């Protein structure tokens, strides 16, 4: 088993937190893991992406080759499109529908959505609204982890434990809000036939 996941978004959206959840769950599951990340200028809304590779056998490179990503999880829809060349033919796309319009010529949103929807295995959800409705607008990224969870090589228990481990220092209320976000993302994703 080897799963290649690309995480994408804009600085400050919690891309590296998603990576930390996946990494923590993989290590707790005694799986091999490699991760690389590129930080944009987060204070200016720069692009951030991470390659996460999880396997039951040793992994020698932290970079995912073109056409080999099993999944792209993105907190920004246009940022997802940047990494489509990495996606396997039958790969999965999971993204928030809310744009972060940090460039003057941001494409028309309908065009972005149509491209995402042209892939049979996609989950395009308003994760930001879901997180806000739960009382934790910063948990958009964890909603997306929940939405992707059924296609990840990690058990739900390992993902939930990773969330608890990573957020424990912020207090029980924040831990519980992030678990709610994960659960709601998982629930919403069942509406998509994948």
Image (cartoon, helix red, strand yellow):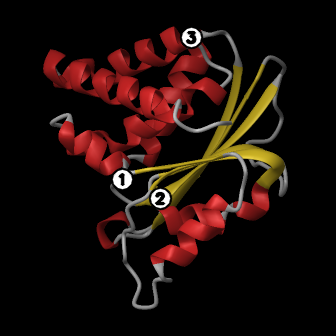
Is there CB contact under 8 Å for labels 1 and 2? yes
- Label 3: state its secondary structure: helix
- Percent position of residue 152, x then y: 64, 27
Give the position of the C terminus as an image quadrant.
Answer: top right
Cα distance between the residues tagged 1 and 2: 7 Å
At 51% from the left edge and 37% from the top edge, which residue is drawn?
A: 19
Residue 143 position (above or below residue 14): above
The residue under label 3 is 28
- Label 1: state its secondary structure: loop
Of the two numbered discs 2 and 3 on the same chain, state the one appearing first in sequence.
2
At 45% from the left edge and 47% from the top edge, which residue is drawn?
A: 15
Q: Nearer the viewer, residue 129 or 10?
A: 129
- Percent position of residue 50, x then y: 58, 49
At 80% from the left edge and 41% from the top edge, which residue is drawn?
A: 61
The residue under label 2 is 9
The residue under label 1 is 13
């Amino acid at each position: 088993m080897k799963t290649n996941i690309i995480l994408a978004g804009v600085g400050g959206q919690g891309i590296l937190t998603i990576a930390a959840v996946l990494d923590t769950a993989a290590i707790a599951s005694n799986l091999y893991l490699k991760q690389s990340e590129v930080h944009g200028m987060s204070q200016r809304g720069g692009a951030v992406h991470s390659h996460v590779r999880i396997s039951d056998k040793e992994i020698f490179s932290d970079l995912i080759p073109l056409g080999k990503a099993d999944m792209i999880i993105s907190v920004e829809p246009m940022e997802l499109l940047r990494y489509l060349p990495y996606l396997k033919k039958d790969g999965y796309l999971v993204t928030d529908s809310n744009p972060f319009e940090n460039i003057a010529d941001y494409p028309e949103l309908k065009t972005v959505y149509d491209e995402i929807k042209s892939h049979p295995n996609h989950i395009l959800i308003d994760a930001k609204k879901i997180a806000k409705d739960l009382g934790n607008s910063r948990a958009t990224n964890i909603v997306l982890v929940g939405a992707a969870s059924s296609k990840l090589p990690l058990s739900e228990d390992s993902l939930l434990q990773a969330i608890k481990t990573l957020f424990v220092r912020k207090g029980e209320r924040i831990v519980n809000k992030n678990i709610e976000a994960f659960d709601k993302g998982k629930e919403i994703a069942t509406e998509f036939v994948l």
